[in-house]
Image (cartoon, rainbow, N blue to C red):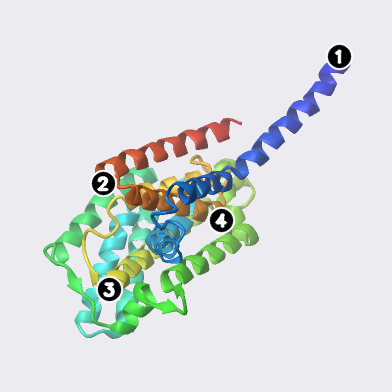
Amino acid sequence: MQSKANETPMLMNHAVKSFEWRKYIVYIAFACVFIYFSITLYDEGFLTANNLLNIARQTAMISIMAVAMTFVIGAAQIDLSVGSVAALSALLSALAMQSGFGLVGGIAAGLGTGVLIGLINGLLVTRAAIPSFLVTLGMMIIVKGLAMWVTNTAPVPIINQTFTFIFGSGDIGPIPILLVWMIIIAVIGHIVLRKTAFGRQTLATGGNENAAKFSGVNIQKTKLYVMMGSGLLAGLAGMLYAGRMNSARFTFGEGDELSVIAAVILGGTSLFGGTATVIGTVFGALMIGMINNGLIIMGLDVSQQMVIKGLIIILAVAFGKKALKK
């Protein structure tokens, strides 16, 4: 009897240590991938400052959308519409400036589009009680169609140099403005998730909805806000795409929803809600960007990159499920 009593705390300690180790897996994996590419692609220039900054540029939009997705998944929801929202927000922002509404009008159009679509998603989830997967899957298709429709699939050039500097192509000294945006959003997201009542309510909603409700959490409002936040940052990402490319296109954001979700799960957020980390998410996004960059330098074609990216997503989901069981 005594041996069983002693065995219980030992098992609990083992479980705690296992969980603690899993919290750092993304950082360990990031370091291993970085070291591997640094050694194997040293002569190809992987470690050059220009290449490392390019990884940051290429990853910034995914990272920003992934910060919002951390809250969405942390609340046990999903948003598949982020890539399409980014494209439509970029187009409407560019069209607003082209129509004479200026920089402020362009920013308002881009961010407003994201918030509006996020609001619609949130209302359908909370008021109509439709699962977020189905809502955002349908919205992804609708918004994609709108993005193609509003310009008849034609790109919209952006000639406002202030816009392109702020949202994408500018540099502050040696630091790309895209990296600055990524850091700002990551810091804000981390503080909100860890230090505010809303962050705690988000995780409580995802962890145990009934318990959260009895604890006084307005779970409907929480779900609505995380969906709106996802739309807002998808709109920002679309503007960053447009600023970097000096034009808006309906192809922006294609497939980004998968990369965003993979980054969140790789970072340590549970696919089933209740556990989330913004810093881990950013490292997950950077790792995906680093892998893409390394594969390109190695000479792999697009089809091969897609296969490897798909494997990463499967491993990310499998890891998230295994972590939950632990």
Q: Residue at x 30, y 60 (%)?
A: 85
Q: Residue at x 30, y 83 (%)?
A: 161
Residue situated in front as seen by the camera: 299 or 256: 299
> In the rendering, at what x and y percent does residue 128 appear?
36, 48
Q: Check disc 3 and report the residue beneath it.
A: 93
Q: Check disc 4 and report the residue beneath it.
A: 279
N-term mark: 1 or 2: 1
Per the model, the C-alpha gap separating discs 3 and 2 is 30 Å
Relative to residue 6, is residue 273 depicted above or below? below
Q: Check disc 2 and report the residue beneath it.
A: 302
Amino acid beneath label 4: Ile
| Contact, mark 2 vs mark 4 (Cβ under 8 Å) | no
- Quadrant where the C terminus is found in the figure: top right
- Direction left: furthest residue: 152
N-term mark: 2 or 4: 4
Per the model, the C-alpha gap separating discs 3 and 4 is 29 Å
> In the rendering, at what x and y percent does residue 188 appear?
55, 66
N-term mark: 3 or 2: 3
Left or right, 303 with reference to 228: left
